[in-house]
Image (spheres, rainbow, N blue to C red):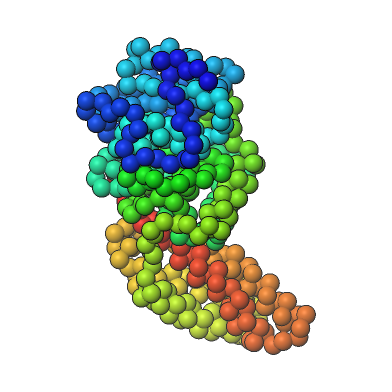
Amino acid sequence: MIVPPSLLLPPSGELKIPHAPETERPSKPIYFSLVVPTYNEGRNIEQVIRVLSGLLDYALPNDYELIIVDDDSPDRTWEIAQQMTGEYPNLRVMRRQDERGLSTAVIRGWQAAQGQVLGVIDGDLQHPPEVLLKLVQAVKNGADLAVGSRHVEGGGTSDWGFIRRTLSRGAQLLGLMILPNVVGRVSDPMSGYFMVRRSAIAECLMSPLGYKILLEVLGRGRVDRVTEVGYVFQERQEGESKVTWRQYVEYLMHLGKLRSRGRIGRLREKFQFGRFLRFGLVGFSGVFVDMAAFYLLRVHFGLGIARSTILSAELAVVNNFLWNDLWTFGDISRGQPGKRQRFKRFLKFNTICLMGIILQALIVSLVHDVFGINEFIAKPIAIVLVTFWNFWINLKLSWRVTDVRRK
C-alpha cells in the first residue's frame, strides 16, 4: 500500500504498544497523544479537529499530537483531515485500508503515537471536548488511567431512552458478575473516553473485540490508580449513530474472552477480608430484623405471605444500609457527607436488593404453596438463596460507584 508523505503508515503485526515511540523522536518528547477513530465522519471532522486543537493548544502548547485514524471511509473523512494538516501542525492522519474496527484503530494509533500519555475520544462530538482538560489534569496528579464516566457526579446522558439506559446498566451489571475485578474498577466500563499512561500498557498484547477498548486496558494493562471524571454524553450533531445490538453482544463476548484467559493484570482487591466480614455480620443482623418483622406482619397484622415477605425484607434492607453506611463502608461514606449523597447510596443499595426481595417472595410462596413447607421455614430458606445477590453485587457496586476520585 502506497501512503502519501502527509499520512501516517498504519502499523501492522501484533497489537502491542511499544515502551518508546518506534518512529524518530522529536527534539522534545511529546506528553500527550490523542487518537480519534473515525468512519464516515466527514461532516464532523473539521469541527472536531478545530475544537480539540484549540483546547490542547491552550492546555499543552506544542506538547501534544492529534491523530485521526480513519478506516478508509467512503465519504473520505481521512482526506478532509489530511487537508487540514497544513493549518494544524500537531495533526497527524492515518488511513487504514487493510484493517477495520474501532478498537484496533485506537491501538494502531497508539502504536504510531509519540506521547507519554495516550488517549481516545469519539469523532462524532458526543464526548464533550472540554472534559479533556480534567482528564489531563487527573493524569498529571498521578492517575495511571483517567476515565470519562457517565455514572459519577457531573455525568449523565443527554437524551437516552429507557431501553438504552436499561441495556447500558444491564451490561454493566452482567460485567460485574462475569469479570468483577476488571469491570468493578470503574463505574462506566463501556466508556470510550479516557487516557492512560503509556507505561501502564506498554508491551501488553491486546486482543480487543468490538468497541470497548477500555476493557482491554483494564484487563491486560498494569493499571494501579484510576480516576473518573463525570461527563454528559451528548447526542450526535451530524451523521448516524453506530450503536447497535451487536455492540452489546460483542461486549459480553469480550468479557468472556478476558475471563477465559484469566488475564486481568495486577489488580488490587477493593474490599479486604475485614470489610467483607463486617458486611456479613450486618447481613446476619438483617436476618433477625427480617424474621421479626415477618412474624409481626403475618401474625399480628394478618397480612398475606407475599406482602409480609416484601415489607419485612424492605425493613431489613433499611437496617443493613444504615449499618453498612456507618460501619462497613464508613471510611468511604465519611468522604461523601450530606443527606443527598447518603440518599443516593441508599437508592443504589435498595435497587440492587429489590430484585433479591422479589426473588425471595417468589421462593417463599413457591416453597410454602407447592411443597407445603411452613412459611417460617420457607422464609430462612429464601434468605439463604438470595444472600449471594445481596452480598456480591452490593459489595462490588453500591459503595464502589460513589468512591471515585473526581478532578
Q: Position of residue 74 (x, y in %)?
A: 59, 18
Residue in the picture at 45% in, 33% down: 108
Q: In this view, which residue lies farthest toward the left?
A: 28
Residue 364, quarter of picture: bottom right
On the picture, is 284 further left or further right than 18?
right
Residue 93, quarter of picture: top left
On the picture, is 77 further left or further right than 34?
right
Camera-side residue: 263 or 290?
Answer: 263
Task: Give the vertical position of 227 relative to 285 (above or below).
Answer: above
Task: Give the vertical position of 38 relative to 304 (above or below).
Answer: above
Task: Give the vertical position of 139 relative to 324 (above or below).
Answer: above
User: Total marks drawn?
Assistant: 0
Q: Position of residue 248 (x, y in %)?
A: 60, 45
Residue in the picture at 71% in, 80% down: 367
Residue in the picture at 63% in, 68% down: 358
Q: Position of residue 62 (x, y in %)?
A: 25, 24
Q: Is residue 344 visible?
A: no
Q: Position of residue 116 (x, y in %)?
A: 29, 37
Residue in the picture at 72% in, 82% down: 368
Quadrant location of the C terminus in the rendered image: top left
Q: In this view, which residue lies farthest toward the right?
A: 370
Camera-side residue: 22 or 224?
Answer: 22
